[in-house]
Image (cartoon, helix red, strand yellow):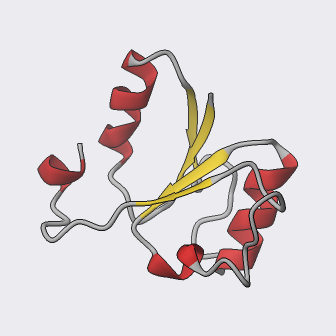
Amino acid sequence: MRVKLDENLPVSAASIFVAAGHDVDTVADEGLAGSDDPTVSRGATEVERLVVTLDRGFGDTQRYPPGSHAGILVLRLDDQSASSIR
């Protein structure tokens, strides 16, 4: 699977996906750091990557309807520390 980590996730989380055999890059790798959600979504869609994020705005299915992107995984964690995310 091709994965793009949003900038609100620690870069160290990439190693978890890589260890599972996934192709991972980050929003920063694509020069999209600081971009709004629609720009990040378009960038990920263009290169067919699943977006993994803590940003609940990506969970809006009216804004990001199924089939309009390669996938979005919104992590809903009470503890958003780097160790909990990994």
Picture residue at 45% right of the left edge, 74% below the top: 55
Q: In the image, is residue 25 above or below residue 76?
A: above
Residue 30 in picture, x, y percent from top left: 69, 50
Q: In the image, is residue 63 above or below residue 44?
A: below
The quadrant the C terminus occupies is top left
Q: In the image, is residue 59 above or below residue 48?
A: below
Total marks shown come to 0
State left or right for residue 33 relative to residue 11: right
Picture residue at 73% right of the left edge, 84% below the top: 62
Q: Picture quarter containing residue 31?
A: bottom right
State left or right for residue 37 relative to residue 77: right
Picture residue at 54% right of the left edge, 82% below the top: 57
Q: Picture quarter containing residue 25?
A: top right
Picture residue at 33% right of the left edge, 29% below the top: 16
The quadrant the N terminus occupies is top right
Residue 13 in picture, x, y percent from top left: 33, 41
Residue 40 in picture, x, y percent from top left: 69, 66
